[in-house]
């Protein structure tokens, strides 16, 4: 996987977020600030524009630019969390011109660890980690990772939130999908789609 693959991944993810932004906002309306869809739409559109303008030369540089762009354009929790995920993964990839599947798994695992530290969350807290960690564990099989992320997001419906604004709702947070896990599932679905087209 080269820089072109990573650019296609994130621009495909941006289109998926644009397509599902209203659903993400509806999910966030039930247990959060009702802005996840609009925030992610704005952030990922900015990522796609930045990647089109600069065309970074390595996979690591693609992720670093995307992460910086999300931090600078998305408020609330989404920007810092997704920005941390991508920037930390980008740093882990370094200057390599091509990345193999196991290297991608290790880089995204480092990113997931950084997200967990930033948010003080763990799997089962009803956050994006409930989709992210199973997906990373399923790598380097990209299709399996996409499926694991989707199942992880679905599993948050039954959970009671223990982090973020949804945690203030207590048991009333049960019965709703975590919007961050839903957007994480979109990210991994885009990754699998780009691999299929390669």
Image (cartoon, rainbow, N blue to C red):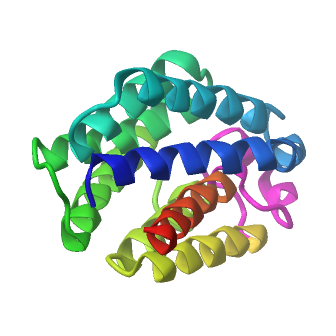
Residue interval drawn in magenta = 159-180
The quadrant holding residue 69 is top left
On screen, residue 158 above or below 173? below
Residue 191 placed where, x, y %?
A: 49, 62
Residue 22 placed where, x, y %?
A: 87, 43
Residue 154 placed where, x, y %?
A: 72, 73
On screen, residue 65 above or below 92? above
Which residue is nearer to you in this view: 51 or 32? 51
Asked if the magenta segment contains residue 138, the reply would be: no
The residue depicted at 66 percent of the width and 68 percent of the height is 153
**Going by the image, does 8 lie left or right of 15?**
left
Asked if the magenta segment contains residue 165, the reply would be: yes
The N terminus is located in which quarter? bottom left
Which residue is nearer to you in this view: 35 or 167? 35
The C terminus is located in which quarter? bottom left
**Going by the image, does 38 lie left or right of 88?**
right
**Going by the image, does 146 lie left or right of 101?**
right
Which residue is nearer to you in this view: 85 or 12? 12
The residue depicted at 32 percent of the width and 57 percent of the height is 108
The residue depicted at 33 percent of the width and 40 percent of the height is 63
Of all residues, the one furthest to the top in this rendering is 72
The answer to whether residue 50 is seen in the rendering is yes
The answer to whether residue 120 is seen in the rendering is no
């Amino acid at each position: 996987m080269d820089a072109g693959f990573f650019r296609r991944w994130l621009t495909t993810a941006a289109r998926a977020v644009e397509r599902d932004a209203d659903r993400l906002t509806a999910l966030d309306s039930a247990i959060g600030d009702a802005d996840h869809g609009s925030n992610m739409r704005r952030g990922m559109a900015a990522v796609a524009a930045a990647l089109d303008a600069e065309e970074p030369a390595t996979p690591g540089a693609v992720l670093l630019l995307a992460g910086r762009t999300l931090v600078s354009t998305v408020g609330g929790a989404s920007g810092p969390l997704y920005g941390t995920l991508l920037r930390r993964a980008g740093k882990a990839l370094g200057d390599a011109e091509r990345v193999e599947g196991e290297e991608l798994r290790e880089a995204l695992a480092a990113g997931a660890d950084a997200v967990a530290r930033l948010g003080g969350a763990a799997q089962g807290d009803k956050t994006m980690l409930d989709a992210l960690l199973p997906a990373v564990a399923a790598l380097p099989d990209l299709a399996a990772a996409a499926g694991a992320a989707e199942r992880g997001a679905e599993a948050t419906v039954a959970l009671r939130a223990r982090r973020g604004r949804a945690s203030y709702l207590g048991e009333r947070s049960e019965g709703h999908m975590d919007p961050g896990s839903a957007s994480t599932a979109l990210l991994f679905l885009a990754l699998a789609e780009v691999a299929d087209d390669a």
